[in-house]
Amino acid sequence: MKNNRRSFLKYAGAVTAGTLLFPHLACQSGSNENTSDTATEDTPTTAPAAAAGLSSFGIQLYTLRDVIQEDPKATIKQLGDYGFKQIESYDGDQGMFWNMKNTEFKKYLDDLDIKLLSSHCDIKKDFEIKAAQAAEIGMEYLICPHVGPQTSVEEWKKVTDRFNECGEICKKNGIKFAYHNHAYTFVPFSGMIPHDFLMENTDPDLVHHQMDIYWVVTGGADPIEYLKKYPNRFTLCHVKDRLKDIPLEDHSASCNLGTGMIDFPSILKVAKENGMKHFIMEQEKYDNSTPMEAAKIGAEYLKNFKFA
């Protein structure tokens, strides 16, 4: 999801500088010699060969926010045709279930052989009801997509307390709760790193974490370092690519999956080794494609993905 607050970002700088700190972020520039002569910037480069790829992958419907409102069913059907077998919804104007009852939405997805894995939602409104509805149709996760930078350590403590409460509510309903990060939690604040504070002050049995890899990088942090530091805490991720040679202070640098600077083969290998279970594409910007074309490109990248 989009982070519109930039005032807390202090780790600004060129992406090329970032790759000096974290060489594994610069996968595409190092793998061009293995791509076909017909590859373009709009076509993902081929991931390095490995023994196995992803057995399944999903897409966050926010990727299609500019088109899905008109006809959610047709949009999701097309995503299934592209190869997505999992979707992650979001709590927009039409709700998590797109103006359908939860059971009606599930039946439609069942007919398409698509699983509603999770949904981002507003945790401040009717969360108990949302947890019960999600549990009724077999969803695995409800996810808080954004809390924004806080003004004090005490305010961050209120956030962790609320996350633990949400985790309790989800656990009682037989599902899981998770938090989706943005860049601001990786920027030093008041003598600490907010994301470390979140990890250390939430109950691992109640609060899971969805690593948005794009926002970790944009916040000036190293995804691999966090995956190793907190094993089995990040159980979902957003596979979202970032344009090459763009300063980290530019938050609007999302691009077609596989065409940017993030080394997903290396990062996702470590992620899987440290408890990552669900790999979900998301994209926020479309310089050289429509949202549906971006989804199709992403699906092809993930179908052919190989771990480093």
Image (tube, rainbow, N blue to C red):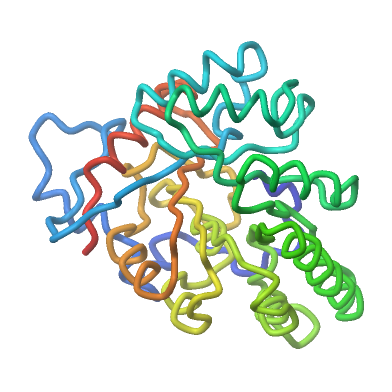
Depicted 126 relative to depicted 186: above or below: above
Where does the image place residue 56, in percent across and percent down from the top left? 35, 46
The answer to which quarter of the image holds residue 46 is top left
Position of 147 compared to 2: left or right?
A: right
Q: How many marks do you count on the picture?
A: 0
The quadrant of the picture occupied by the N terminus is top right
> Which residue is outermost to the bottom?
191
Position of 23 compared to 233: left or right?
A: left
Decide which of 210, 214 is in the foreground and name it. Answer: 210
Where does the image place residue 190, in percent across and percent down from the top left? 80, 83
Where does the image place residue 39, in percent across and percent down from the top left? 17, 33
Where does the image place residue 108, in percent across and percent down from the top left? 56, 22
Residue in the image at 37% along x and 41% along y: 257
Residue in the image at 77% along x and 63% along y: 172
The answer to which quarter of the image holds residue 133 is top right
Decide which of 120, 218 is in the foreground and name it. Answer: 120
